[in-house]
Image: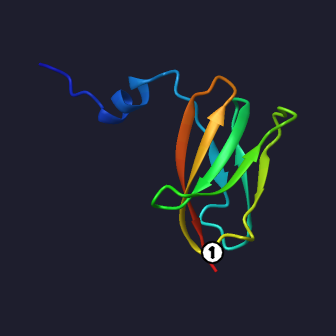
Amino acid sequence: EKQAVNPDFLIINQNPNRHEAVIYPNPSSGKVVKIKSSILIKSIEIMTMIGKCVQQQLNPHMLYDDITLDLKSCNPGTYYAKITFEDNQTVIKKLILRK
């Protein structure tokens, strides 16, 4: 009898070298969010749904601390955060800003 393969397991293990980051709070009703990762983050770009960059933040001191983003200039809506790590790998996360 063939054992069923857990599809979640396959997804997780397709690319074991993929970096991960967490944005919190998300959705955010405030105008500040933090980004946490176990890998050093080099930069973060906040983009609209159509790919227009509305904000870019570098981590010039290359600190491992959570990165705080001030999004006061962004209107409520859905954005994408493109997070670039020190080895130039990227991950894109959805970010929702509420009023």
Of residues 13 and 78, the one nearer the viewer is 78
Q: Residue at x 15, y 20 (%)?
A: 2
Answer above or below: position of 14 versus 37: above
Q: Position of residue 42 (x, y in %)?
A: 72, 34
Foreground pick, 39 / 78: 78
Q: Residue at x 70, y 48 (%)?
A: 35
Mark 1 burial class by Cα count in 10 Å: few <14, some 14-19, many 20+:
few
Residue that numbered label 1 is attached to: 75
Q: Residue furthest front?
A: 52
Q: Locate residue 50, reporting x and y percent.
A: 45, 60
Q: Is residue 67 above or below residue 77?
A: above
Left/right placement of residue 87 relative to residue 67 reads left
Amino acid, disc 1: Asn
Image quadrant in which the N terminus is located: top left
Identify the residue at horizontal 61%, vertical 61% (top origin).
26
> Please, what secondary structure does the residue beneath circle 1 have?
loop
Left or right relative to 9: residue 93: right
User: Which residue occupies the extreme right position in the image?
Assistant: 61
- Foreground pick, 43 / 36: 43
Q: How many marks?
A: 1
Of all residues, the one furthest to the bottom in this rendering is 99
Q: Residue furthest left?
A: 1
Would residue 98 be found to the left or right of residue 4 on screen?
A: right
In the rendered image, residue 47, in percent from the top left (x then y), is placed at: 57, 56
